[in-house]
């Protein structure tokens, strides 16, 4: 199980090292498919994603309809970029 996650992380690092925009778009699509597959594997194995401390605040802000503030808090907690944080909050909504 850990080897699957480690492999996924290594793939992500390798993909992020690509620099041309055409390659990046293709890589982003492939990365999204890989993330979906890892999510399916984790779900099938009954493994839950570890909770990030403070994430309950993000869920609370979403329930209150404060998505922009939720995105800001998510970014602070995870260190993700704006787009990734926005996408994550949208998935939680």
Image (tube, rainbow, N blue to C red):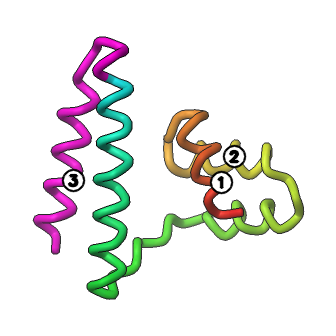
The quarter of the rendered structure image containing the C terminus is bottom right
Is 21 within the magenta?
yes
Q: Which residue is mark 1?
A: 89
Any mark on residue 8, and which?
A: 3
The boundaries of the magenta stretch are: 1-23
2 or 1: mark nearer the eye: 1
Q: Residue furthest bottom?
A: 46
Q: Which residue is mark 2?
A: 71
Q: Is residue 75 left or right of residue 93?
A: left
Main SS of the magenta part reads: helix
**Gap between marks 2 and 1, in whole Å?**
6 Å
Q: Quadrant of residue 1?
A: bottom left
**Gap between marks 2 and 3, in whole Å?**
25 Å
Provide residue 38's location: percent of width, then percent of height. 29, 64
Label 1 or label 3, whichever comes before in sequence order: 3
Provide residue 87's location: percent of width, then percent of height. 60, 46
Q: Are marks 2 and 1 in contact (CB under 8 Å)?
A: yes
Using the image as rendered, state which of residue 88 and residue 34 is in the foreground: 34
Any mark on residue 19, and which?
A: none
SS of the residue under disc 1? helix
Q: Label 3: how many residues lie within 10 Å, few (<14), some (14-19) or many (20+)? A: some
């Amino acid at each position: 199980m850990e080897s699957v996650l480690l492999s996924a992380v290594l793939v992500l690092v390798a993909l992020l090292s690509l620099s041309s925009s055409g390659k990046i778009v293709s890589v982003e699509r492939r990365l999204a498919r890989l993330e979906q597959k890892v999510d399916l594997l984790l779900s099938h194995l009954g493994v839950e994603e570890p909770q990030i401390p403070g994430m309950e605040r993000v869920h609370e802000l979403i329930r209150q309809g404060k998505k922009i503030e939720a995105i800001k808090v998510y970014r602070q907690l995870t260190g993700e970029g704006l787009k990734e944080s926005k996408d994550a909050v949208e998935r939680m909504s």
